[in-house]
Image (cartoon, helix red, strand yellow):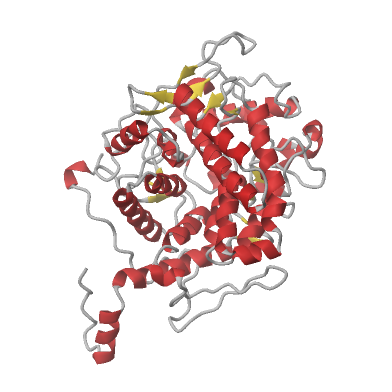
Amino acid sequence: MTPPPPPAGAGPAAVRARATAPPVHTAHRALRRSACRVLLANRTGSSTVPSRDLYPHQWSWDSAFIAIGLRHLSPVRAQQELETLLSAQWGDGRVPHIVFNPAVPLGAYFPGPDFWRSSSAGAAAGAPRGIETSGVVQPPVHALAAWLVHRADPHASARRAFLAGMYPRLAAWHQYLSEHRDLGGGGLAAAVHPWEPGMDNSPCWDGPLARIEPADPASFRRADLAHGAAGDRPTDLDYGRYVRLAAEYREHGYRDGAAVHPFAVEDPGFNALLIVSEYALARIAEELHGDCAAHRRRAAARTEALVRRLWSPRTGQFHCRDLRAGAGADGAGHGGALVPERSAAGLLPLMAPDLPRPLVETLLRTAEGDHFGLGTRVRLLPSYDLRGASFDRNRYWRGPAWFNVNWLLERGLREHGAHARADALRAAVLHAAAASGFAEYLDPYTGQGHGARDFSWTAALALDLLGRDADTAAGADTAIAATTDGAGTAEATETADGPAPGPGTGVSAPVPGPSSVPPSEKGP
């Protein structure tokens, strides 16, 4: 890339500076400064909120992604992020999808602690008494996050006994999913609520949700519509069904054996993350001189079950399995059926290291084909089939591109040697993070940001991708450095580059984007 000409009247020093500082590195340093500022601004105590307004509590898989990015800023803070989340773990091993901050007013988010009533309704399942949480879970990316955080600073990790403290909790979390959530009996974990697989409003749930009678709209008030456009959020009908499912689970004391689970779905993305995290747990066990073989056996068995139960040779990708499709009134008597909708979750098994090579090659073709158009019609993987009848480029998880999904896919591409594709996706993610002000999600065609801005996992995962740059990895020209004391606090310091931009201000130089998508392929 040819550096742009210096401003009119610039002297020889300015010309030399332009010639010796490649724009991409300058832009990446500016992006790193902004990403760090977002994470620092969204920090509350020992954890990080996804968004100050829309999501003012601690979310489970958000914190795992946030820790992965924080490790480049402060490994100790990254450790604390996960430790805080796991301190709210239930006695049965589940990691709840929300840990509520008691300082936040009850009306700021729905459903809040007064809806879930975890400490009372969940007492029989081992909900903690002194911490209010939700009763459902999110994808199990935590062991992967813990391993990556440990590797960022093994000495600090050992000094704080980070892995020794995390391992039994992570092992109990995986055991919960294996023993309590294998509702289909086929070796995969099932989600019992659309919020659990992470892709809350996916068209994959339309069929299973159609069987659910929605809660009375007068029985709840949606706080999310005060912070986002109604056209970007789930419909009132869908939200009523979400509330009904959660309330019925609560009335059964969140005990999986006691609940009927009218919604029970095996999701390929959820189980792929469990496979990857099981391998990470093996690495953690090995580091602690424990038994790692059992974790590897479980990961291999789950990979085999994933292929056996969720792979579709016809569509060339994995699909969700609706375990209640064709079941009797009691939810029993049928093995379920694959959901025909094509979701980005069906490509995430690329992360599994032992996925058979023919399936890997098929998934790579599917990602670039007509239904997802990665690198041809769009630069970032959309959350749902571009050609699907329910595709909506703006509405939450029904088409928009999400940064965490693309970060996971980028890892999957590298896992199987598709480095050129991974490099292109990395460039596209960084460009989109900068251009959108760290948006929650994007229109996959135009890149227009939707949802919250200064979104924590967007900033964190951009920071992680930037960590591969030689200059940022070595700490050169870093605008924000974290200095951690014994209590784990951090301060932001500035270098000669000048003050770092604050949240919402963007970056001081544009991140060069990937090559253009052909105009005829830019979509509707």
Q: Is residue 15 left or right of residue 206?
A: left
Q: Quadrant of the N terminus?
A: bottom left
Tell me what residue is drawn at x 58 percent, y 23 percent: 264
Q: Measured along the vertical axis of the image, is residue 306 above or below residue 23? A: above
> Would you say residue 467 is visible in this rendering?
yes
Tell me what residue is drawn at x 58 percent, y 48 percent: 283
Image quadrant in which you'd find residue 438: bottom left
Q: How many marks?
A: 0
Q: Measured along the vertical axis of the image, is residue 482 above or below residue 210? A: below
Image quadrant in which you'd find residue 184: top right
> Would you say residue 142 is visible in this rendering?
no
Q: Quadrant of the C terminus?
A: top left
What is the x, y in percent for residue 112?
Answer: 68, 42
Q: Is residue 249 left or right of residue 405?
A: right
Tell me what residue is drawn at x 45 percent, y 20 percent: 338
Image quadrant in which you'd find residue 444: top left
Tell me what residue is drawn at x 60 percent, y 63 percent: 154
What is the x, y in percent for residue 280?
Answer: 56, 46
Give whichever of 124, 118 is nearer the camera: 124
What is the x, y in percent for residue 220?
Answer: 65, 34
